Image (cartoon, rainbow, N blue to C red):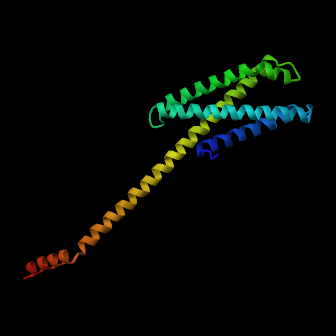
């Protein structure tokens, strides 16, 4: 199965974000067993891939309704709200499962901190999607500019070639000859 370039980039961003959170988890929970870290890693990675594909689907859907050329701020706002809604829905659906895996009581502060991390994750994902789209558009515009420059050079070359046409040269010499005599 060959993935589109946008999907591959989104998956790489998800893996990068996940790697950061994995390092943070190892730092904050060194007393947990390797098996616990492995279970949390596999489940978290599965969650992130599912979330990434859903976010990609939202991106494709919004691309049809609100392309990047029109209403950029509306597009960013809608993408943020929809992605955050999906994240909160998945989070609420999976809370009972994850509560059984957590070996400690989740305090209000930890809950808010994890929610903040989720918002950071959503913003990072959306910014990477927009960065990719704007870079892609910039590259396309650069190619179009190069094509136009090439066409301009060809037109100038054709003009110079037409000026060296023997008929044109003969007419120019005839005009000069009549001016001189």
- Compare residues 112 and 63 and report the one nearer the observer: 63
- Compare residues 112 and 88 and report the one nearer the observer: 88
Q: Is residue 27 visible?
A: no
Q: Is residue 91 left or right of residue 162?
A: right
Residue 39 position, x and y percent, is 84, 32
Q: Residue at x 43, y 53 (%)?
A: 144
Relative vertical location of residue 56 with respect to residue 106 in this rendering, above or below: below
Q: How many marks?
A: 0
Q: Residue at x 88, y 21 (%)?
A: 104
Q: Residue at x 64, y 40 (%)?
A: 10
Furthest residue in direction front, as rendered: 1
Relative vertical location of residue 142 with respect to residue 63 in this rendering, above or below: below
Residue 131 position, x and y percent, is 57, 41
Relative vertical location of residue 101 with respect to residue 164 in this rendering, above or below: above
Residue 99 position, x and y percent, is 82, 20
Q: Is residue 79 visible?
A: yes
């Amino acid at each position: 199965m060959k993935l589109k370039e946008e999907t591959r980039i989104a998956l790489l961003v998800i893996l990068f974000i996940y790697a950061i959170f994995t390092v943070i988890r190892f730092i904050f929970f060194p007393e947990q067993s390797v098996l616990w870290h492995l279970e949390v890693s596999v489940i978290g990675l599965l969650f992130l891939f599912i979330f990434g594909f859903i976010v990609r689907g939202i991106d494709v859907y919004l691309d049809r309704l609100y392309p990047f050329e029109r209403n950029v701020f509306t597009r960013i706002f809608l993408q943020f709200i929809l992605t955050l809604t999906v994240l909160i829905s998945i989070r609420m659906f999976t809370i009972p499962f994850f509560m059984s895996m957590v070996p400690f009581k989740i305090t209000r502060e930890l809950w808010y901190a994890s929610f903040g991390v989720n918002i950071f994750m959503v913003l990072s994902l959306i910014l990477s999607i927009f960065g990719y789209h704007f870079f892609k558009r910039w590259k396309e515009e650069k190619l179009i500019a190069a094509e136009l420059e090439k066409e301009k050079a060809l037109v100038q070359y054709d003009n110079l070639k037409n000026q060296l046409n023997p008929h044109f040269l003969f007419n120019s010499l005839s005009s000069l000859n009549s001016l001189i005599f």
